[in-house]
Every structure is written in C-alpha cells, then in structure tokens.
C-alpha cells in the first residue's frame, strides 16, 4: 500500500503544510475516518470519486476533488476496496492565498473542490494516468499560479493568536491569548471564529489533538502523550479521541498508515 510524501516548493510552504500521494488496496468494506486537524484538507481522487460524509452520514456525496474545512468531528470515507489520490493539508493563510476566502468560509463542511476552479476538473483528469513525479509537479504549478499576494494576509493579532494556540495548546488559556494579542476575550472570539471557522477553544483542542497524533505515530505511549500535550490523564485523552476521531488511539494507528516510499 504505497504512499508518497512530497515536499512542496519553498514558495508554497507558508500555504501547504503537507502533500501526500497514496494508492491503497483494501477490503471492499473498509472505511477510513478523516480526522479533525489544524489544516484544511484538499483531496484529489483518482480512478473513482471519493465517497465521503460525516461519521453520522450527513452530507454524503461523491467527490472528484474534496475540500474539508476545519472541523471538530470525523468524516467517513467508504473505500470500496481502493483509495488512490493526493491529499493536501492547507494552512489558514493558504486558504486565503489560494482560494480567496478565509478558512471560516469552509468550516465544518465538505465541499466540491472544483467550485470556483479551486482544483479544476481538467487538472483532476490530467493527473489520472501519469507518473507520481509529474502529478506532484502539475499540482505545484497549479497552486503556484493561484497564489494571490493581495489576499495572502490575516490580521496580525489573529495570526498571532493562531500561533499561540497551536504551539502552546496544552499550557495557555484563551483569556491569556486575548491579552497577549491586545483584544478582549469577546473580540477575540468573534474575529477568530470569522477568520478560522472555529473558536479559540476549539483551535486549541485541534492543536492538542494534532500534537498527540504525531507523538503516538512515533511510538510514544498514550499515558506519556497525555502528560506531554496537556490532557489531564490518559482517560481524558481517550475521551477526546472518541469525540474527535470516532475511534480509540490504537484504532487510529491501524487506520491507513502513511509509509513513505520513493516517488517513482
């Protein structure tokens, strides 16, 4: 089950934090949980459209390209035995620069990535039957052409708040973030939610979840992870995992492991 981790060009680095190609052969009944994250997910499907919904079945549709904004519940991808495509994790700044809108415009929803030619259908078709290196090159070229320097900015106080909540997720209170960026707590809540589509508390929760995932994937034990990233204890981590991911940490580790192969 190969996957290929592509390093985007430096000019895209502020906007795209990861780019992974994958080609998984699975049991026909296998399903994959799309986990909440501090990145906005873009998936370009090959061979067959992506069969995706929220875990409760809401918004189920088939997507040649999918954009999933910041969210606090898992999605469900029905694999039908084969998943083949490219997945991008886009930063909030990248959503503005590449797609011309704040991340808040896409929060808690699954949308067709071809809307407004964000990932046009002709690009999705061109990517189908070419080598991986060429696929990544075409995606890079498309995104580089889309960068709008005029739109690539977030209010400095909101960018700072996002950074604080992401890097100190287990050790900083929202009230303290508001004070550091010079806003009242109410002002921070209103402007932050408009920009990112989640509240500061939810952003801190997503950042802590991201950090925990990375540590678990590198072999840390759950109790150690809970203490490191700011959960009260391991049961607290497990409760958060079920709420955000719909699975336990151990089940998550068994779900679509990313193993980097050499890009052919």
Image (cartoon, rainbow, N blue to C red):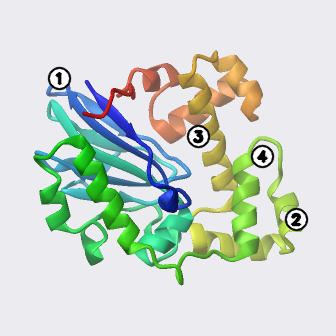
Mark closer to the chain start, 4 or 3: 4
Label whose residue precedes the other's in the sequence (1 or 3): 1
Q: Which residue is mark 2?
A: 180
Q: Residues within 10 Å of mark 1 (few under 14, many from 20)?
A: few
Quadrant of the drawing holding the C terminus = top left
Question: In the image, which is nearer the foreground, mark 1 or mark 2?
Answer: 2
The tag on residue 27 is 1
Left or right of 193, for residue 244: left
Q: CA distance from mark 4 to mark 2?
A: 13 Å
Q: Which mark is residue 136?
A: none
In the image, residue 105 sits, relative to residue 87, either above or below, namely below
Which residue occupies the extreme bottom position in the image? 150
Residue 128: x, y in percent?
Answer: 13, 49
177 relative to 6 in the view: left or right: right
Q: Tag 3: Cα neighbours inside 10 Å, few (<14), some, or many (≥20)? A: some
* Eye-nearest disc, 1 or 4: 4
Label drawn at residue 210:
3
Looking at the image, residue 76 lies above or below residue 3 = below
Q: Earlier in the sequence, mark 1 or mark 4?
A: 1
The residue lying toward the viewer, choosing from 54 and 99, is: 99
CA distance for labels 1 and 3: 28 Å
x 32%, y 63%: residue = 141
Query: 10 Å neighbourhood of mark 2: few (<14), some, or many (≥20)?
Result: few
**What residue does disc 4 label?**
168
Name the residue rendered at 25%, 24% in the picture. Answer: 1
Residue drawn at x 63%, y 54% as measured from the top left: 202
Q: Secondary structure at mark 2?
A: helix
Q: Report whether residue 59 is seen.
A: no
Q: What kind of element bears circle 1?
A: loop
Among the two numbered marks 2 and 3 on one chain, the one whose residue lies closer to the N terminus: 2
Q: Quadrant of residue 108?
A: bottom left
């Amino acid at each position: 089950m190969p996957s290929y981790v592509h390093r985007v060009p430096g000019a895209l680095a502020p906007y795209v934090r990861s780019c992974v190609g994958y080609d998984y052969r699975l049991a026909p009944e296998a399903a994959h949980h799309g986990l909440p994250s501090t990145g906005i997910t873009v998936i370009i499907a090959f061979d067959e459209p992506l069969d995706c919904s929220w875990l409760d079945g809401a918004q189920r549709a088939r997507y040649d390209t999918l954009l999933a904004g910041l969210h606090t519940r898992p999605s469900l991808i029905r694999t039908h035995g084969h998943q083949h495509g490219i997945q991008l994790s886009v930063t909030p700044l990248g959503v503005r620069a590449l797609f011309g809108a704040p991340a808040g415009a896409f929060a808690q929803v699954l949308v067709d990535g071809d809307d407004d030619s964000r990932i046009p259908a002709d690009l999705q078709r061109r990517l189908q039957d070419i080598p991986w290196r060429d696929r990544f090159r075409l995606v890079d070229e498309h995104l580089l052409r889309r960068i709008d320097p005029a739109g690539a900015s977030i209010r400095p106080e909101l960018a700072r708040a996002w950074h604080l909540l992401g890097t100190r997720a287990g050790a900083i209170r929202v009230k303290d973030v508001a004070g550091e960026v010079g806003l009242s707590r109410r002002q921070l809540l209103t402007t932050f939610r408009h920009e990112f589509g989640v509240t500061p508390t939810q952003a801190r929760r997503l950042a802590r979840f991201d950090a925990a995932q990375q540590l678990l994937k590198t072999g840390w034990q759950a109790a150690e992870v809970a203490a490191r990233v700011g959960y009260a204890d391991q049961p607290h981590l497990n409760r958060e995992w079920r709420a955000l991911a719909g699975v336990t940490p151990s089940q998550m580790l068994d779900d679509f492991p990313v193993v980097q192969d050499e890009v052919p």
